[in-house]
Amino acid sequence: MTARILDGAAIARQIREEVRAEALAFVTAGGRPPGLGALLVGDDPASAIYVASKTKACEELGLHHVTHRLSVAATTEDVLGVVEEFNRDPGIHGILVQLPLPKHVDAVRVLDAVSPAKDVDGFHPENVGLLSQGRVRFAPCTPAGVMEMLRREDIDPKGKRAVVVGRSDIVGKPMAMLLLHAHATVTIAHSRTKDLPEVTRARDILIAAVGKVGLIRADYVSPGATV
């Protein structure tokens, strides 16, 4: 059997072109440009690159964007103030709080303060609850991207055995939920799962979301599986 590469970069380009056209049509028809509010606290280089890539994407797609940068010394109240500003701004339709926040900032309070209607990361408890019920308003971006890849590659999870290696609130758990709603039979495994190769080999779809390079090896995968 010849392996088929799932080209995420090509799919991303296709989606961006679709979004660009949709945004242009919406604005041309008299709508307000969709707006993203991003909040970056501290000077973590990886976080800065991530936020910069999002703002660049907004510019390329014709979307409105505002980025607030706070110093690493910012307090929880400082951060909450910016979140509330975004909540009240009618030109901001989605809010992205870049994680991780500095350790002295109460991340739970901050994420809970984001308006559920603008919580594009899908981290607010209300949106997590809706996701668990199959009434998805916003799903975290990585799991949503995986489901979009499967859809565009004509890989239907219905009836298939899937394993998600990882149990984080950001990727592993919502990934499992989305697969369940797509009628897959889902197993959640993680770095401490006993006999992990036996668990992963017995599945049709394998999604590695554990954040550990090299944990999944070639002999963990059964022939014909989607990885």
Image (cartoon, helix red, strand yellow):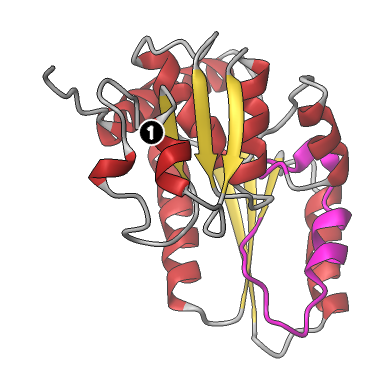
Left or right side of 169 for 17 = left
Reply yes or no: does residue 103 show up in magenta: yes
Residue 209 seen in the current view: yes
Q: Quadrant of the N terminus?
A: top left
Q: Quadrant of residue 67?
A: bottom right
Left or right side of 116 for 225 = left
Residue at image x 81%, y 83%? 75
**Tag 1 residue:** 201
Residue at image x 64%, y 85%? 71
**Total of numbered circles in the picture?**
1
In percent of width and height, residue 180 lies at 65, 21
Residue 59 seen in the current view: no
Left or right side of 28 for 92 = right
In the foreground, 3 or 148? 3
Reply yes or no: does residue 84 show up in magenta: no
In percent of width and height, residue 193 lies at 56, 52
In the foreground, 214 or 74? 214
Q: Secondary structure at mark 1?
A: helix
In percent of width and height, residue 61 lies at 43, 35
In the foreground, 114 or 174? 174
**Relative to 29, residue 56 above or below:** below
Direction bottom: furthest residue: 73
Residue at image x 46%, y 59%? 211
Q: Which residues fall within the magenta stretch?
A: 97-122
Left or right side of 168 for 133 = right
Q: Quadrant of the C terminus?
A: top left
**Relative to 140, residue 82 above or below:** below
In percent of width and height, residue 72 lies at 65, 86
Q: Residues within 10 Å of mark 1 (few under 14, many from 20)?
A: some
Mark 1: which amino acid? Answer: Arg
